[in-house]
Image (cartoon, helix red, strand yellow):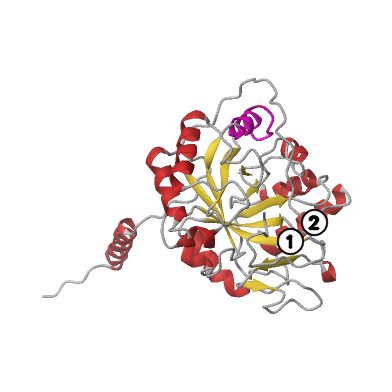
């Protein structure tokens, strides 16, 4: 006589099967800002030529954060911003939203989401060396923050350049224009983010002379999750051992930053062609990184400019990540302590500037130099 499993038993067996299947699937670790072995890499400007699709840089565990470079005009035609991702998506090589110069890069949504599914953070950098940026008031900065939220982060807009993809945050690489009102911009983004369950990150890329000429005040007034300090193209760069000043930035992180858990990254060129000065070989950069890991609780990892240069330079990014992970890991938040105010860094060496209306030379190695 045949026996039949009861409906409840069949459901239980099916659910148990699903649970077992899920338990054996590989788990992808989410991006963790508290670690000191993270690698952040700028992507988008095709600095060395031969830039690969974004998703190609997410295929392994080398890169933790990919920073899309750049949104370089705040108030373009039709009142919309302008982005330029070189050979991938730009106003000159891609469709634009009607009445604007804002490129429709929605074909990238799947690539962005694929990277995020692998535990990578994907953010958007605002500015660059030749950006047409800045605000006239706190009010205009807040309006722009609303626009960025709606178009790139957790909001909704008919003009979302990356379609349904929701980026993980924004980066400020401000090297021209007015230096004021950025705190209002950051605070408004924070206000939006606090209403969401998704974690959003706000970073900055100051140059190493302290305080930074364009972001110094903002860094003291608003909360940043990390600073990607550019230790290149200045006399406090990685190739200047006597004036290299990561200790000054650690002191700022501990004593002046509104976010006492802010992470300080060593920003470095990923090849000798990626910057005018500051390039060091992988062994030397690795030594700087491991020294920082052991010396500074604020240290978060290394930032590289840029992805294409790293690949072209014998996979420089992989060599740096290997060194970081060999000695790094998750560290508890630093304890607040008092320290004397650091002396200002040496005078900033500024690169030649082009007219702000000119579109970046997207394949030039000098875009951020």
Q: Is residue 62 visible from the viewing direction of this image? A: no
Query: Residue at image x 43%, y 48%?
Result: 321
SS at badge 2: loop
x then y, percent, for residue 210: 70, 35
Residue that badge 2 annotates: 133
Task: Answer whether labels 1 and 2 touch (C-beta < 8 Å).
Answer: yes
SS at badge 1: strand
The quarter of the image holding the C terminus is bottom right
Residue that badge 1 annotates: 72
Query: Residue at image x 71%, y 61%?
Result: 71
Q: Is residue 78 left or right of residue 199?
A: right
Query: Residue at image x 77%, y 49%?
Result: 185
- Asked whether residue 166 is drawn in magenta, I would say no
Crowding near pointer 1: few (<14 within 10 Å), some, many (20+)? many
Q: Is residue 112 visible from the viewing direction of this image? A: yes
Residue at the outermost left position: 1
* Residue toward you, 212 or 244: 244
Instruction: Residue 149: give its label.
Output: none
Q: Eyeballing the image, is 203 above or below 308?
A: above
- Extent of the magenta region: 243-260
Q: Give residue 272's quadrant in the image.
A: bottom right
């Amino acid at each position: 006589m045949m026996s039949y499993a009861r409906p409840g038993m069949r459901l239980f067996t099916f659910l148990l099967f699903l649970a077992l299947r899920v338990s054996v699937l590989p788990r992808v670790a989410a991006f963790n800002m508290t670690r000191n072995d993270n690698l952040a890499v700028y992507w988008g400007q095709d600095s060395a030529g031969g830039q690969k699709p974004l998703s190609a840089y997410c295929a392994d565990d080398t890169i933790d954060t990919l920073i899309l470079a750049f949104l370089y005009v705040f108030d373009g035609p039709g009142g919309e911003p302008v982005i330029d991702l070189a050979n991938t998506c730009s106003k000159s090589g891609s469709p634009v939203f009607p009445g604007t110069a804002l490129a429709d890069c929605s074909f990238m949504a799947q690539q962005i989401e694929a990277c995020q599914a692998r535990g990578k953070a994907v953010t958007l950098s605002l500015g660059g060396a030749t950006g047409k940026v800045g605000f006239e008031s706190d009010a205009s900065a807040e309006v722009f923050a609303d626009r960025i939220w709606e178009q790139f982060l957790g909001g909704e807009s008919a003009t979302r350049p990356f379609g349904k993809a929701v980026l993980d945050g924004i980066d400020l690489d401000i090297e021209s224009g007015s230096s004021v009102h950025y705190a209002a911009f950051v605070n408004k983004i924070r206000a939006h983010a606090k209403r969401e369950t998704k974690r959003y990150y706000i970073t900055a890329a100051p140059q190493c002379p302290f305080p930074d000429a364009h972001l110094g005040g903002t860094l003291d007034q608003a909360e940043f999750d990390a600073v990607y300090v550019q230790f290149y193209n200045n006399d406090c760069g990685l190739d200047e051992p006597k004036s290299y000043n990561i200790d000054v930035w650690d002191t700022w992180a501990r004593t002046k930053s509104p976010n006492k858990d802010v992470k300080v990254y060593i920003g470095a060129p990923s090849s000798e062609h990626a910057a005018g000065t500051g390039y060091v070989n992988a062994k030397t950069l690795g030594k700087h990184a491991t020294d920082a890991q052991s010396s500074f609780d604020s240290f978060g990892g290394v930032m590289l400019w840029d992805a294409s240069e790293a690949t072209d330079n014998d996979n420089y990014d992989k060599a740096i990540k290997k060194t970081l992970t060999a000695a790094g890991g998750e560290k508890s938040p630093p304890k607040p302590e008092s320290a004397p105010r650091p002396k200002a860094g040496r005078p900033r060496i500024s690169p030649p500037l082009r007219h702000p209306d000119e579109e970046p030379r997207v394949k030039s190695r000098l875009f951020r130099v």
